[in-house]
Image: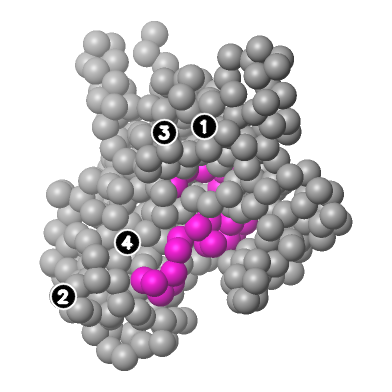
Amino acid sequence: MQGSNDRILQFVDRMNLPNIYWRKSDALHTSSDGQKFEVAVDSLNANYSFKYLGKDKGVSVVTFIDMRELMWHSTVISSAEREAAYVIDGLMHNDGVKSDIHSTDTHGYSEVIFAATYLLGFEFAPRIKGLGRQLLYAFKNRKYNEEQDHMLLPDRYIHEAFIEEQWDEVLRFIATIRLRVTTASQLFRRLNSYSKQHPLYQALKEFGKIPKTLFILKYVDDPAFRQAIEKQLNKVEGSNKFARAISFGHNQEFVQSEKEDQEIAEGCRRLIKNAIVCWNYLYLSRELAVEKNKERRVELIEAIRNGSVVTWRHFNLHGEFDFSDERMIDSVGLTVPQNTPLETD
């Protein structure tokens, strides 16, 4: 199932039109978010989440999407688990989508994730609830910064000794993730299983306060940065609505009990979503290719740039689909060059 999704992503990646969503920088912005689904059968992977599921048990489907609205990874976890531990799994999963900046909501954020993403070469840019209550950290205490007449004073200081004592273990931990010996979520689960906070976990948490502080300062100072985070998170929230629209059967519940089977069902759902997004890109590329009026072309490009290809109203999701050879023909005329120029002059 993952291979089929990857083929679609590789095909769309060769097209010009998806590049219309890139910002001026060369950084690829991605995001992830969890969505709760009920499980209709007994499952060890399901758990209670009264806020979202009431008295029923369910799971959380964590979906990863980039700024071109390509959904390259998803995983099914217990609804009682935090999504933060699985952020690294998604970023390391696919060689075709190389994330530069990744955003989550508060559920996907922790100081340990700040540390791991920084050391792995990703910029982590979450939307943190109650940002004004977050603490700022520095390598010197507040009194030292007051004596230096610094305008911005930290709330706490970094305990460098925690990091120095475990630095070799920190590097080994990151290398294990980088080499994909095991997943980050398994490593985090192991560290969290100890009765007392593990020294390595404590060192990662302490190190993570550094990029977290730098992120908060940038977030407060840069309105364009804040807008980009919000825009990217809107994309993944839109994909969650997309998933609900596709999952019209079985009361939108999982009917599989095993985690592996739930992952397969979610992979199929993601395949349908990516196929629809691909079709939308092909259709819009054709419209741009045949449009000769310059003003109309400019209007169409701007509409695409300010809109979304995650739209499904023109698909009959409740219908019957015929995949026989005689019906598998291009009846809409989408066999146009994929690399349609996007210039307007």
Q: Foreground mark, 2 or 4?
A: 4
Residue under the point 65% across and 28% down: 142
Q: Foreground mark, 3 or 4?
A: 3
Residue under the point 63% across and 42% down: 209
Which SS class for mark 1? helix
> Which percent across, then down, holds residue 59?
35, 73
Pick the residue in front: 122 or 71: 122
Residue type at numbered disc 2: Asn
Please tell me in which quadrant of the rendered image residue 131 appears: top left
Residue type at numbered disc 4: Gln
Q: Earlier in the sequence, mark 1 or mark 3?
A: 3
Q: Foreground mark, 1 or 3?
A: 3
Kindly check if marks 3 and 4 are in contact, taking CB atoms under 8 A apart as contact: no
User: Would you name the residue on which mark 2 appears?
Assistant: 251
> Which percent across, then down, holds residue 60?
36, 68
Which SS class for mark 4? strand
> Which labelled disc corresponds to residue 35?
4
Question: Looking at the image, is 211 positioned above or below residue 154?
Answer: below
Residue 290, can we see it? Answer: no
Question: Looking at the image, is 253 positioned above or below residue 313?
Answer: below
User: Would you name the residue on which mark 3 appears?
Assistant: 132
Residue under the point 15% across and 49% down: 313
Q: Foreground mark, 1 or 4?
A: 1
Mark 3–mark 4 distance (CA, rounded to whole Å): 26 Å
Q: Earlier in the sequence, mark 2 or mark 3?
A: 3
Residue 307, can we see it? Answer: yes
User: Would you name the residue on which mark 1 appears?
Assistant: 216
